[in-house]
Amino acid sequence: MASSCLNLAKSFLEKPAISAFDKLNQRNRFCSSLMGFPVWKCNGRIVCCHAKGQVRTANGQSSPAVADDNLIFSKSNEDFHMLDLVSSKGANGSTTLIGFEAGIGIASFLRGKTFFITGATGFLAKVLIEKILRTAPDVGKIYVLVKAKSKEAALDRLKSEEIHGNTYQEFMLRKLVPVTGDVREANMGIESALAEEISEEVHVIVNSAASTTFDERYDVAMNINTIGPFRLMSFAKRFKRLKLFLQVSTAYVNGRRQGRVMERSFCMGDTISKELASPDFSADSMPILDIETEIRLAFSSTKAFDDSLLVKQMKDLGLQRMMDPIVLYYGKGQLTGFPADPKGVIDVIPADMVVNATLAAMAKHGWAMEPGINTYHIASSTVNPLVIQKLCRLLYKYFNSSPFMDSEGRPIEVPQMKLFDDINKFYTHVESNVMQQMSSNEKRSQQLNKICTMLVEQAKHLANLYEPYTFYSGRFDNTNTQRLIVEMSEEEKREFSFDVGGIDWEDYITNIHIPGLRRHVMKGRGMCGSGSQLVSTQL
């Protein structure tokens, strides 16, 4: 998963009733509403007040408490709280302080919450929904916006793209509510009765809907990725119980900034005006918008990819946003070089870390009482950079020890990846390689020559798509994200880990990432004994 950016807009919440604990020194307490009752954070611990043997539940109701060793239960056993400050013997008929290790309260925040999630059949949102349901099975409903012709079609798509395995189907269908709609329409295109129900029940909105095609037409990308969130924000104004609006985006959507990119929001026009004012900026360096060329390129690339099962699988796995097409072409011996800055950095993050950070930020600001906008970069480029030159060495090492097999079952040998500092030099390299291979074997079939020509065009296409990233000189600051980790309890750090600084890139790339590509995208093709081999043509 490419580095991600979270923007959280906090809605106004009602101030809780004043209690005796308001007498605590203001400097030593942090007020929240954990599980429906006041919580104070004092000297790194959390203290909760339970009065007269009553246990407050998530919906604010109370029930008599009973003691059992170091736990206090309600009689329904639905609510329980750990004790370590005082004995539970005092729970009946008196005020009792219950203490436990401080943390953000991620699992507690998720309990009973109702979500509205867009882009729910996409890669990242699938991982998010799975994590919520696995760690908080007592979560409320999750409304998932699905682009479909009807409610029945939306349910079918939900079952086929979101729910996996009969074991969980009944549970998932109880929690997941398919909503037919589209971010390109007002009020998300949701029929009025259901829209009213959603606005009455939802606590958290997560917008993960986006077009991830790098060469999408400008008008299409603008409508989905820019105006779409604006429409969703307008729809959110109707929500009665909304605590949080969370926008997920790639951090690379930030113009042509250089150096350290901070975690802060920008005003409309702020970025462009600063770049235009820079003495290093030249208007001649900006690409000219040619609508006819854009439409032609979009059409030709779509036509080329329509029948490609590989690309469909990669899109389902969220891999169009990464360097994985290049990795696979290199491993198959079809790409020997690429335009990139050897000392540049590719900012990639495992999807589960993005999701864990999302849930931590969601809980932190969902508990808080203050409205505002907060930005988090889940990024590696400042704390644990993956340098392009190192990535190329890891790829070479991996594919030499675990090569793909060609059409005759022989291992495909790959050379060291050659990096070009200019895209035109790369074009020359590709074309000369193909011409050399075609002339060296005159008996090569006409079909194979067509494949070579197609591969040349594909290599050029990839180079054009990725050039802004392989020569990108910005680095994403993640100070806010690091502070989020500090606030977590040890248990939360184990269950919701997103410490990017702890990633061992060699282990991750060679033992997790590439094997995952071969298993889930290539479906074992090109592996020894798979029965399905590959054609190798070097570019």
Image (spheres, rainbow, N blue to C red):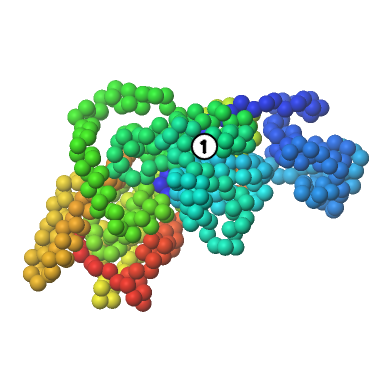
- Relative to residue 445, is residue 498 drawn left or right? right
> Which residue appears at 19% of the width and 62% of the height?
451
Q: Position of residue 80 (x, y in %)?
A: 77, 48
Q: Quadrant of residue 437?
A: bottom left
> Which residue appears at 34% of the width and 38% of the height?
221
Q: Position of residue 4 (x, y in %)?
A: 44, 42
Position of residue 93 relative to residue 236, above or below, is below
Q: How many marks?
A: 1
Q: Quadrant of residue 13?
A: top right
Quadrant of the rendering where the C terminus is positioned: bottom left
Q: Nearer the viewer, residue 378 or 37?
A: 37
Residue with the most extreme right position: 93
Q: Nearer the viewer, residue 240 or 328?
A: 240
Crowding around mark 1 (Cα neighbors within 10 Å: few <14, some 14 to 19, many 20+) is few
Position of residue 501 relative to residue 475, above or below, is below
Name which residue type carries label 1.
Answer: Glu
Q: Quadrant of residue 403?
A: bottom left
Is residue 375 among what the camera can see?
A: no
- Relative to residue 157, is residue 131 drawn left or right? right
Position of residue 385 relative to residue 234, above or below, is below
Please, what secondary structure does the residue beneath circle 1 have? loop
> Which residue appears at 55% of the width and 49% of the height?
129
Is residue 533 among what the camera can see?
A: yes
Reading the image, the residue beneath label 1 is 191
Q: Position of residue 510 (x, y in %)?
A: 40, 62
Q: Position of residue 236 (x, y in %)?
A: 54, 31
> Which residue appears at 82% of the width and 39% of the height?
62
